[in-house]
Image: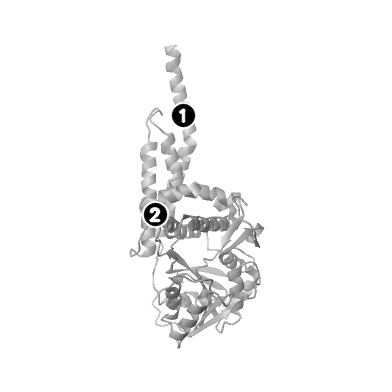
């Protein structure tokens, strides 16, 4: 009996070793992808400024607004204080005259009488996407041929318009967009989101460029000629789309245009948010990406730099016979994930911002697993205070109720 037990033990160990092989492969693959993502980010000249004496292009800035918070005024003022020699028109649109943003814009008009700043009530609902509906109506009042679209919570450096118009050049069918960072992650929940934005998202965009030119745009800040917008069908073509920025860039590229990535980083300033708000925002983002890029999003779980090394560590215990190199490799992978995330945050904020705690990338990656699953288990999102269902092709449809997996 003792002889049989001693013979069975090597066989059992062999079975454990063989079953551990898939986790070893996934662990090593995720480590390799983390390194590749970090290398893609390290090779990009963030914050590089071109030597532009003074921008002379005439620009219209379109700012769709809905409500306001403590950061909205500073964000809007940053657009009024641009060091740009050419004419700058700033159009702010709200859907109802009783929106709190109206009083703020009217006060800024009084405080900056020399600026071409206007408030427009964009009450006409052209489609399901209220922001794009507002943009379509704002664009009709644009006096200049270079359009800049920016979210309400975006604060920009004073030379942004000079840089964007220089990078856009004379191209008639191009779009320039900016990377962005969450500048005021004031709660633990927002620090989780900051890892997604300030560490992972921008480096994943650069990683995607390794496969070829970008065929999508980043909507925080975009600049393009009016002709490029008209060639893409105008804003009216996207009034029922969830990912309007993605669709605009995608359609532009399909028609022979080009999406360029600026080296200038803009900042998103948001009011404090708790776990529920951040989860809903992350879920909308996840379902947006899943709709736009279903196959890449499905395989994105392979790049989870915490999940697979951790599972490898847990499964490869001391009961595995022979040299157990999973432990040092798995631990090295976890340390690498935290270190590269810290470095990517540092690069994006120029070394001057407040970064998430060192352990937050691990938490973010583990929380990403149920978020990844939830992106496939439902099609409902909350956005700008309204509820929608996302249909095939990213088309939005109003939803009267919201439930888990709905």
Q: How would you rate the neighbour count of disc 1 (Cα within 10 Å): few for under 14, some for 14-19, many for 20 or more?
A: some
The quadrant of the image that shows the N terminus is top left
**Quadrant of the rendered image containing residue 172:** bottom right
Q: Is residue 375 left or right of residue 353?
A: right
Distance from Cα at disc 2 to Cα at disc 1: 33 Å
Vertical relation: 322 (above or below) 41: above
Q: Is residue 100 found left or right of 379 in the rendered image?
A: left
Query: Furthest residue to the left?
Result: 352
Q: Is label 2 in a helix, a strand or a loop?
A: helix
Tag of residue 341: 2
Left or right position of 290 against 313: right
| Numbered circle sitting on residue 16 | 1
| x and y percentages locating residue 289 in the rendered image | 56, 57
From the top left corner, tell me how far across and down residue 147 is, in percent: 54, 77
> Would you place residue 260 above or below residue 362 in this image?
below
Q: Nearer the viewer, residue 236 or 340?
A: 236
Q: Is residue 379 visible?
A: yes
- x and y, in percent, of residue 405 in the image: 60, 50
x%, y% of residue 323?
37, 31
Q: Earlier in the sequence, mark 2 or mark 1?
A: 1
Q: Are marks 2 and 1 in contact (CB under 8 Å)?
A: no
* Residue depicted at 35% across the width and 61% down the height: 354
Colouring chosen for the image of the structure: one colour
């Amino acid at each position: 009996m003792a002889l049989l037990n001693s013979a069975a033990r090597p066989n059992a160990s062999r079975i454990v070793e063989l079953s551990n092989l898939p986790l070893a492969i996934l662990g090593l693959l995720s480590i390799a992808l983390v390194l590749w993502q970090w290398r893609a980010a390290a090779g990009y000249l963030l914050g590089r400024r071109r030597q532009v004496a003074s921008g002379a292009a005439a620009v219209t800035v379109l700012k769709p607004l809905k409500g306001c918070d403590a950061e909205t005024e500073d964000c809007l003022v940053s657009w009024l204080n641009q060091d740009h020699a050419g004419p700058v028109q700033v159009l702010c649109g709200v859907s109802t005259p009783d929106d709190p943003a109206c009083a703020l814009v009217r006060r800024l008009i009084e405080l900056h009488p020399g600026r071409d700043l206007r408030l427009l009530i964009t009450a006409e609902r052209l489609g399901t996407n209220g922001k794009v509906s507002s943009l379509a109506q704002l664009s009709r009042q644009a006096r200049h041929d270079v359009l800049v679209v920016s979210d309400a919570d975006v604060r920009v450096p004073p030379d942004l318009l000079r840089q964007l118009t220089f990078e856009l050049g004379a191209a008639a069918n191009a779009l320039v967009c900016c990377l962005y960072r969450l500048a005021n992650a004031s709660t633990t929940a927002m620090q989780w989101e900051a890892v997604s934005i300030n560490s992972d998202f921008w480096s994943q965009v650069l990683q995607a460029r390794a496969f070829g030119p970008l065929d999508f745009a980043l909507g925080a800040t975009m600049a393009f000629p009016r002709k490029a917008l008209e060639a893409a069908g105008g804003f009216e073509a996207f009034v029922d789309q969830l990912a309007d920025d993605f669709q605009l860039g995608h359609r532009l590229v399909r028609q022979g245009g080009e999406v360029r990535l600026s080296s200038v980083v803009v900042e998103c300033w948001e009011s404090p948010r708790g776990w529920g708000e951040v989860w809903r925002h992350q879920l909308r983002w996840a379902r947006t990406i899943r709709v736009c890029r279903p196959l890449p999003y499905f395989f994105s779980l392979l790049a989870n730099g915490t999940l697979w090394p951790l599972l490898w560590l847990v499964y490869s215990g001391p009961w595995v016979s022979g040299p157990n190199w999973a432990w040092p490799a798995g631990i090295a992978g976890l340390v690498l994930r935290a270190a590269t995330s810290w470095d990517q945050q540092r690069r994006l904020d120029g070394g001057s911002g407040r970064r998430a705690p060192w352990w937050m990338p691990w938490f973010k990656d583990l929380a990403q697993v149920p978020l990844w699953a939830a992106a496939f288990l439902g099609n409902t999102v909350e956005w700008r205070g309204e509820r929608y269902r996302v249909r095939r092709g990213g088309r939005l449809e109003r939803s009267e109720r919201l439930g888990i997996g709905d």
